[in-house]
Image (cartoon, rainbow, N blue to C red):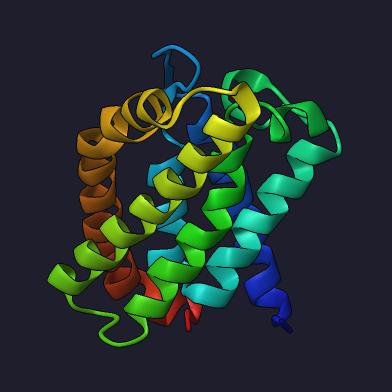
């Protein structure tokens, strides 16, 4: 994945945005509701698949090396292998799914909403499986506590990310040389 210097800077800036929005948390048991998924969808919708996914990878790398960028100012490999680690890894799949779907109709609001919802569901699916394996929960508990609980907030954040991402990209694309 070769990016121009401009794309690398954009990815780094969005990694910071993801880190900032990650701190917006509402505790809901083992898995908190955060602004991360909104930021992930916004990054990919605004920057495109390659640059948006690079922003996600930078964000994850910053957290893995010890910078407190994950939700609740947490960091480290322990977070990755904990109950919420699957959602973090799922962000990569979110970026790839959202970006791949957006490649068909990148400026269509309805399609962007569908793409972001699909990406959010990919994150939830991966995170739920990880939650089950990391905690030893049964499938029913993992599904209700790690997937069902987050569907409505996930859809709301996906819609917001899609609408804001397309709006900003249409307004700023020529100034930022996006895509």
Q: Is residue 172 above or below residue 161?
A: below
From this viewpoint, is residue 46 visible?
no
Q: Position of residue 16 (x, y in %)?
A: 62, 44
Q: Residue at x 28, y 70 (%)?
A: 171
Query: Is residue 69 toward the left or the right of residue 131 in the image?
Result: right
Q: Quadrant of the N terminus?
A: bottom right
Q: Residue at x 50, y 74 (%)?
A: 49
Q: Residue at x 21, y 62 (%)?
A: 113
Query: Is residue 28 toward the left or the right of residue 80 in the image?
Result: left
Hey, which quadrant is residue 80 in on the image? Answer: top right
Which residue is situated farthest in the bottom direction here?
A: 104
Nearest the eye: 161 or 153:
153
Which residue is situated farthest in the left direction here?
A: 110
Nearest the eye: 51 or 89:
89
Q: Residue at x 84, y 31 (%)?
A: 66
Hey, which quadrant is residue 55 in on the image? Answer: bottom right
Q: Is residue 9 above or below residue 134?
A: below
Q: Position of residue 139 (x, y in %)?
A: 42, 32
Q: Position of residue 7 (x, y in %)?
A: 63, 74
Which residue is situated farthest in the right direction here?
A: 65
From this viewpoint, is residue 150 visible?
yes
């Amino acid at each position: 994945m070769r990016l121009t210097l401009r794309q690398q800077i954009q990815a780094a800036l969005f990694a910071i945005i993801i880190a900032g929005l990650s701190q917006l948390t509402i505790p809901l048991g083992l898995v908190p509701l955060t602004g991360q998924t909104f930021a992930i969808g916004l990054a990919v919708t605004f920057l495109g698949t390659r640059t948006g996914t690079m922003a996600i990878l930078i964000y994850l790398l910053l957290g893995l090396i010890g910078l407190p960028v994950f939700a609740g100012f947490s960091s480290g490999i322990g977070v990755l292998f904990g109950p919420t680690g699957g959602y973090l890894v799922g962000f990569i799949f979110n970026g790839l799914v959202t970006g791949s779907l957006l490649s068909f109709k990148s400026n269509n609001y309805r399609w962007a909403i569908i793409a972001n919802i699909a990406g959010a569901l990919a994150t939830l699916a991966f995170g739920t499986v990880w939650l089950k394996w990391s905690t030893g929960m049964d499938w029913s508990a993992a599904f209700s506590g790690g997937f069902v609980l987050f569907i409505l907030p996930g859809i709301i954040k996906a819609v917001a990310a899609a609408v804001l991402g397309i709006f900003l990209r249409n307004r700023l694309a020529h100034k930022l040389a996006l895509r």
